[in-house]
Amino acid sequence: MNFKSAAHLAAFSLAVFLPAAAMAEGETYVGLSLDSDYVIWSQRQNDHSPALQGYVEHNFASGLYAGVWFSQVDYEAFGLDDNAEIDLYLGYRGTAGKLRYDLSYYMYYYDDYGYDSSDIVAEFAYSLTDKFALGAKINARQDGVNGGAYYYGPTAEYVVNETTVIDAAFGDNTLDHRTHWNAGIVHRLGDTVSVEGRYYDSSSEKGFFTLGIAFDTTLSNLLGKK
C-alpha cells in the first residue's frame, strides 16, 4: 500500500489540506482517486494501466484512526488472478513540539489470493522550518512471503503554499537491498480536488512518471451535514 489520503495530509503534513477543526473534533473522511498506475516501492502494481483507488477513514479526536483502502491491481505477469487489493488499517498520529509521528498497522487482502501479509509502519517528520521537514519511514513486514523484512528510508517535504506540497522519499530493504526513490508534487484545486505528478526510479527498473487526480472530503460534507 502506498497512498496519501487527504486525512493523512491534513494530519501529518505541514500543509493543511482539510479543515483543522474537523481533525480536532474527529471526523470520517472519504475519497476516490484515479492514477496512471498503482505503485509500491517504485514497482508498478497495475501493469502500466490506470488504477481506481478509494478509502474511508475515521479520525478520532484522541489521534487514533482506522480505515479501509482499495485499489485496482493486475498481477497476471506474476501468474496471479487478483484484480483488487483491499487494506485494513488502524493507527495513531500525534505531535511533540516540531516532531510529527504516525504509528500504524496494516493488513493486506486480495480478491483472489485472500489474506497476504501485514505491516507495522512508523513514520516520523521533524519541521526544520515552517515550510521544510525531514523524516523517515519504516515498514516491518510481519508475515507472508517476505515476513521479517524491513523497508526503510528518509523522507523530505517542502510546502510551497497552502495548496501545494513537494515531497521526496528514498528507500531500501533487508530482503534484496533493491533501492528506490520518488519525488512528486501535490496541488489542491479547491476544497475537494487535488492533482499529483510523481517520478519513480529504482535500482532494478527504469524510471517513470505517474499522474493522478483525487477527490477527498469529509463524510458530513458529502451527506450535506454541517
Image (tube, grey):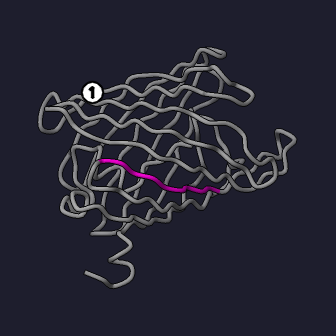
Which of 26/112 is in front? Answer: 26
The spot of residue 223 in percent (x, y) is 38, 82
**How packed is label 1: few (under 14 Cα within 10 Å), some, or many (20 or more)?**
some
Name the residue beneath numbered marker 1: 134
Q: Is residue 67 magenta?
A: yes
The spot of residue 190 in percent (x, y) is 27, 69
Which of 14/96 is in front? Answer: 96
Residue 56 sits above or below residue 159 on the image? below
Q: How many numbered marks does the figure carry?
A: 1
Residue 211 sits above or below residue 208 on the image? below
Q: Which residues are magenta?
A: 63-71
Which of 32/20 is in front? Answer: 20
User: Which residue: 73% across, 44% down?
Assistant: 115
User: Which residue: 72% across, 47% down?
Assistant: 47
Residue projecting furthest to the right: 79
The spot of residue 85 in percent (x, y) is 67, 52
Residue projecting furthest to the front: 62
Please identify the dominant SS of the magenta region: strand
Q: Amino acid at mark 1?
A: Leu
